[in-house]
Image (tube, rainbow, N blue to C red):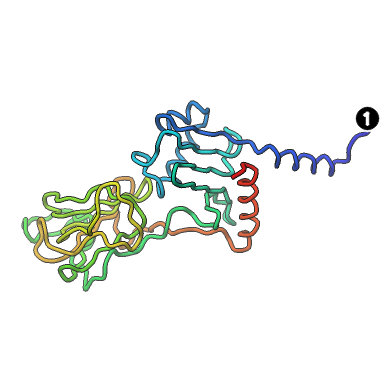
Amino acid sequence: MRKLPPILLFLLFLISSANALEHTTINITRSLNYDAQKAHINQKTVDNILRIFSWRIDFNRDLKKGDKFIVVGNRGATPSAIIYIGAKKRIAVFSYIDKRGRLGYYDSHGKTLYPSFARSPLKYSRISSEFTRKRFHPILKTYLPHRAVDYVANRGAPVYAVANGIIKHNKRMGALGKVVYIKHGSNYTTVYAHLSKFARGLKPSSKVKKGQVIGFVGSTGRSTGPHLHYELRYKGIRRNPLTYRLPKQKKVASSDLKRFQNRANSILRNLKM
């Protein structure tokens, strides 16, 4: 039999690869971790799914029996795409390595699922207390850590979510008074305290968008006057909102965008999606 030229062998390889895209489906019956293990998906990939999709999915409440994740690529390698299919929505992300060699996952528009964070949650007149390990408390009359920023504003001024997220709590909590906790992805939480009242319709598990009004400035709890007590937490640890390097939405480089989108569309076509 005549040996085929290398270039022809390479073209045949590309064609066969395109026609038989390797992928694994995680069918949700109990939980992501349980069903991923049944599908022989490695833990690193499961952790990436949680990290990436937590910006759009509440894994405790949104994930339902019958939902599925399609992981494109070898089980032991970095997926080239991960696609969530639920009863009401589909979310697809595709791998991309930027010019600095950093791997990330981006939607079909070439953007990460996580947004940029706003630097502050309201229009304020001044900062009365900054993030510090030692502050003289005006009510308790003793020195205590103050791992937050206090923004002075008029009573009733609107307070906004600094990024897309899911309401964790909105209730009265002791010294914090009326307070809202918002979970952003799997690692970030923001806290908005001493509110006079909550925005209408707000409840635990509600999804909020960046810039959405979540409450109004007040002086509930242990407070000497109208202001917002604002906390930023990363993996449960309070960070200085004024100096901490906040997440910023990334985009595929414009020079690579068309090639990236062609690849994403090719993957979806191959999966008949």
Which residue is painted at 22% across and 58% down in the image? Answer: 200
Instruction: Indicate the amino acid at tag 1.
Output: Met
139 to 13, vertically: above or below: below
Which is nearer the eye, 125 or 216? 216
Residue 18 image offset from top left, x and y in percent: 70, 42
Seen in the picture, residue 192 relative to 5 is either above or below; the reply is below
In the displayed structure image, the side of residue 1 where residue 108 appears, left or right: left
Left/right of residue 31 with respect to residue 264 in the rendered view:
left
Question: Residue at (33%, 55%) from the top-left corner?
Answer: 208
Q: Position of residue 136 (x, y in %)?
A: 12, 59
Residue at image location 49% in from the left, 48% down from the top: 91
Q: Nearer the viewer, residue 218 or 136?
A: 218
Question: What residue appears at the point 38 percent right and 48 percent down from the top-left corner?
Answer: 185
* Residue at the far bottom in the pictured view: 125
Name the outermost residue toward the front: 87
Residue that label 1 marks:
1
| Residue 174 at x, y percent in the picture | 11, 49
Above/below status of 18 relative to 230: above
Comparing 262 with 119, the one in front is 262
Q: Give residue 196's quadrant in the image.
A: bottom left
Residue at disc 1, secondary structure: loop
Residue 207 in the image, given as x and y percentages of width and height: 33, 52
